[in-house]
Amino acid sequence: MPTSAGHLIVRQLEAHGVQRVYSLPGESFLDVLDGLHDSPIRTVVARHEGGAGFMALAEGRLTGLPGIAMVTRGPGAANALIAVHTAWQDATPLVLFVGLIPVADRGRDSFQEFSLEGWFGSTAKRVLVLDDEHRAAELVAEAMHAAASGRPGPVVVGLPEDVLVRTTESGAVPPRPVPAPAPDAGTAAELAARLATAERPLIVAGGDGWTVPVTGSGNDADASFPGRPASGAARDDAAGAGPRTAGAVLAAWAEAAHVPVAADWRAYDAVPHSSGAYAGYLGYYRSDELAARYREADLLVFVGCGRSDVPSDGYTAGLDATTVVVLPDPGAATHAGRIDQQIVATPASFASALPAPRDARGTRGSAWMDALDEARRRFADAAPEDPASGVDLGVAFGLLEQKLPADRTVTYGAGNATLWGHRYLRHAGPGTLVGPRNGAMGVSVPAAVAASIIDPDRLAVAVCGDGDFLMNGQELAVAAAHGTAPLVVVVDNGVFATIVQHQEKHYPGRPSGTGMTNPDFAALVASFGGHGETVRDTAGLAGAIDRVVEAATVRRVPALLHLVIDPATMPPSTAAASSAGERA
């Protein structure tokens, strides 16, 4: 039957298994919106295009499928650009559909006309434009494939409004399979030989793709770990039955092989924190002891990530160690410096082809791994910081770790306010964290809203500063509209704290352009039908946390914990804290 190009786009998204699209409506893509009217795909209407883009980013991060955002031309596309840049630097699959002016109006400086390629060409994997209605399904399939294959990232698809309403007899096409390159036996043997002779090996796990289930053994210390990536997505099974995530398989193998695993910046959920191999995270506000061990390592194995500036302290650490890089991208675009062995593989295909732990262990005992595990545990134990006034964040996040459900998703904004969460909130396994690795502000709330829609039974907790919240806090209206209940933790110091930290270092005693006046955050969430608590001193923490957790998990309404702190509060001194480069 003839159908419009706009309706065919929706049918093709259905063929790819897309369950949600995040959108701000626009007259430029009305026919796509009409196609969604009768579709099983759920349309989530955001309140700002940046929020829609960050929701799609969270979808891609948590599900492994490209997140879908739809916005209109000109101003709408401009607002969504921040999410495209985040997906580009974070290597997260995302497809942004942008409504465009009619073809006949091009080149006349028409209302909201702009150059799609000019705006997005430098920060997207592909920029495509639908100029032929008969290729609508094919173009969507191409975009989905490009976003998910190789190094994942964003693809932008332009939709001229007149092409969308043209009819075609073309139908949906089969989705293109996404290649999952895997190491062969010789590659695995070479890696095992390197590991067996290393005295101080360290795996750095990062990027996306750790939620993919892997079949095969994962607990036998002397198994060869045969298996293959399984389809779909699943949480880790504590009993070990059935497929387990790539992150869980790697953690079990690493513990048996006596190889510690550190997490890359804001990829802290790559492996379960309960594993004896987990050594903590690299990047801003990491443990000084882990940073020292990273510099001492004689073999670094990067899996799903490369040696970038943040974990290497500005390309100054770990440059001389023997280096193995495991990435699906043959170009290893995210890696800088030495490569002694390159393995083209996804985290799942790598985890499915790991050598036997005994072959990788050699004669190395567990002392190196155990020392890193013990240091990580000390670093993650919350302790009072005794600020001059306001809430003690060491106590606050220690209590949050105790009182929040273990099965949760944590989303982060940017800036110093999030660093206590990084240190003290633990992760049970992959698919439980969304945070901007590029330092974009405004991610925390829309990502938590998306997480609460994707899995309403798992508590989504947003951790952000006051500046970060006010960039996209309006997206709590979306949670209210969909009946979900994220919990937002707002750390309020009335300043853009990271920038103040830099100012004090370079221009001491001369604050400029970094102060802000804030609303009543608890009253704001109440206006959305939620429950808010404002805490101004440490004594009121425990009761307030109990009440917001009860609101989000029992009454199932959005909740907000407003923590007022001393503006002078800074993260406890570490070598990396002073190099933090985020905006707030």
Image (cartoon, helix red, strand yellow):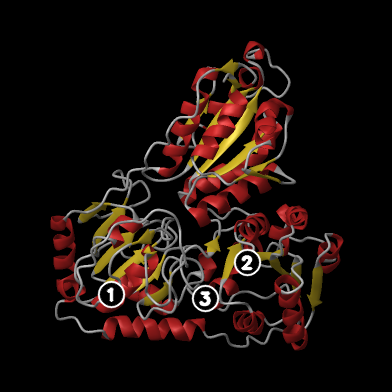
| N-terminal label among 2 and 3 | 3
Q: Name the residue under label 3.
A: 426
Question: Label 2: few (<14), some or many (≥20) within 10 Å?
Answer: some
- Estimate the spatial distance between the alpha carbons at disc 1 and disc 3, rounded to whole Å: 20 Å
Q: Does 377 sit left or right of 480 as displayed?
A: left
Q: Name the residue under label 2.
A: 457
- Estimate the spatial distance between the alpha carbons at disc 1 and disc 2, rounded to whole Å: 34 Å
Provide residue 391's location: percent of width, then percent of height.
73, 81
Q: Count numbered badges in the picture.
A: 3
Quadrant of the rendered image containing residue 436: bottom right
Provide residue 130's location: percent of width, then percent of height.
54, 22
Q: Does 541 sit left or right of 347 as displayed?
A: right
393 vs 513: above or below: below
Say which amino acid is labelled 3: Arg
Q: What element carries label 1?
A: loop
489 vs 179: above or below: below
Quadrant of the rendered image containing residue 352: bottom left
- The residue lying toward the viewer, choosing from 28 and 11, is 11
116 vs 370: above or below: above
In the rendered structure, find residue 259 and report the number of the disc placed on it.
1
Q: Quadrant of the C terminus?
A: bottom right
| N-terminal label among 1 and 2 | 1
Do tag 2 and tag 3 residues touch (Cβ < 8 Å)? no
Q: Residue furthest front?
A: 1
Q: Which of marks 1 and 2 is in front?
A: 2
22 vs 581: above or below: above
